[in-house]
Amino acid sequence: MTYEEVLAYFENNCRSNSQPDEARKKLMLSLLNHPEQKVPTVHVAGTNGKGSFCAMLSSVLTKAGYRTGTFISPHLVEYTERMTIDGCAISRADFAAILTGLLIRIVPQVLAAGFSHPNEFELLTMAAFVYFAQESVHLIVLETGLGGRTDPTNLGKTILSVIMPIGLDHCQILGDTIEKIAGEKAGIIKEGTPVLSAVQRPEAMAVLQQEALCRNAALTVVEPHWQRLWQRESGQKFSLQTRENNYPAIDIKLLGDYQLANCAVVVYAVEILQKMGYKISRQALLEGLAEASWAGRMEYWALKGERGVLFDGAHNSDGAQALAKSLQTLADKRPISLLLGILDDKDQKMMLKHLLPLTETVYVAKPAQKRAESWREVENYVQILKPTAVVVSDENSQRLAEKALGDLPYGGILCITGSLYLLGDLRRHLSQRCER
């Protein structure tokens, strides 16, 4: 099968998203000769910040000389972005070859055993395990897809569990309270295996502490002792004090207040890995952090006329709140326009309450996704919450982006947010017009 044929197979056979089935996943891994047990894994869960953490830690590990596999989701432009080694995405040919083997050899045996068809994310996770094992990586940085307890990534050979900030998202699947969602995220904590947590809401932290205690897992909680030294469009510098070390100057390309918090978790993770015997020098840590990049998170592209486009994948209420705070700091009185598309299963109204104080001009788009049927509700909410705002909507997001850029005043920033699907579409469309 070609790369395009594999994607067509996903579209035609995997969109029903069959329910998680532990026995089905274990059967697939057994048929594949357990690739998930061949490489040690840093496993990452949480509501926000997982991808940024993975990008930064992977960059540090690579700089330290470790061949590092990274698995993230979703992708922005191509499926191959989900599986990288030392920052390089899997080739289309390798992606197609591994998935073809799964679809032709493994899936028929799973169906013959009486199981329902594996969902897309299960197949991609299995493919990642196979790819990293056959490429003999030293470590995998593995991001959960949804939740943690029943996620297919939870079958890896975990040496460190990391839980990023927990908030309300995917409530229809994970639960409608912070405690329930934290319980699902805490499902990645393994018996006797260290666990690291970002700063959490008290109700989430209580759940994590209880799970760690039950699993005899040493829990480290990041302490929020960091301070920004400066920030500009090209990046930022900050100082950090951990329990054991002082870092007076850390440079990162990633923008936003929340990236300082994410970076702090990475530094704590490195300190834990160092205690395990991984040789990661301070120089490798600082150089890896300085070189790390993460598309679609406070990602600034320059335009002529001192203008710019900022892409941020804030797709839930906590993400929108973090974006609003960070953008207000970065913009520093520059005029801001919003171009957003929010999926049906998100708290559209609460996200807008965080974002609307930033602007008087809002462009409402329809993300290219099935969960975007109520996209016009966003326009209605804007008009209710901020009657003075100028609102423009268009089902064609690329045409809307062109309109928004044409209207953008000198010195202005167009912030594109609300859905990763929208970001992926418009990053591709605008890539020839902006300087990165």
Image (cartoon, rainbow, N blue to C red):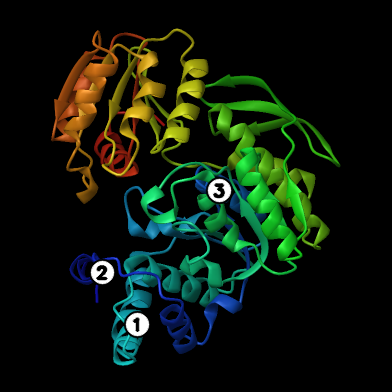
Determine which of the numbered discs, if any, sits on residue 101 in the image.
1
Mark 1, residues whose alpha carbon is within 10 Å: few (<14), some, or many (≥20)?
A: some
Task: Return the x and y of residue 139 as percentages of the image width and height.
Answer: 63, 65
Residue 194 left/right relative to 129: right
Q: Nearer the viewer, residue 393 or 247?
A: 393
Q: Amino acid at mark 1?
A: Gly
Q: Are marks 3 and 1 in contact (CB under 8 Å)?
A: no
Q: Amino acid at mark 3?
A: Glu
Q: Quadrant of the C terminus?
A: top left
Determine which of the numbered discs, if any, sits on residue 14 in the image.
2
Task: Return the x and y of residue 109 as percentages of the image width and height.
Answer: 33, 90
Q: Amino acid at mark 2?
A: Cys
> Label 3, on which residue?
179
Q: Are marks 2 and 1 in contact (CB under 8 Å)?
A: no
Task: Please report the residue visible at 65 percent of the width from the left and 59 percent of the height from the top.
Answer: 161
Callout 2: SS = loop
Q: Earlier in the sequence, mark 3 or mark 1?
A: 1
Measured along the vertical axis of the image, is residue 32 above or below residue 201? below
Question: Looking at the image, can residue 329 be seen?
Answer: yes
Measured along the vertical axis of the image, is residue 100 above or below residue 172? below
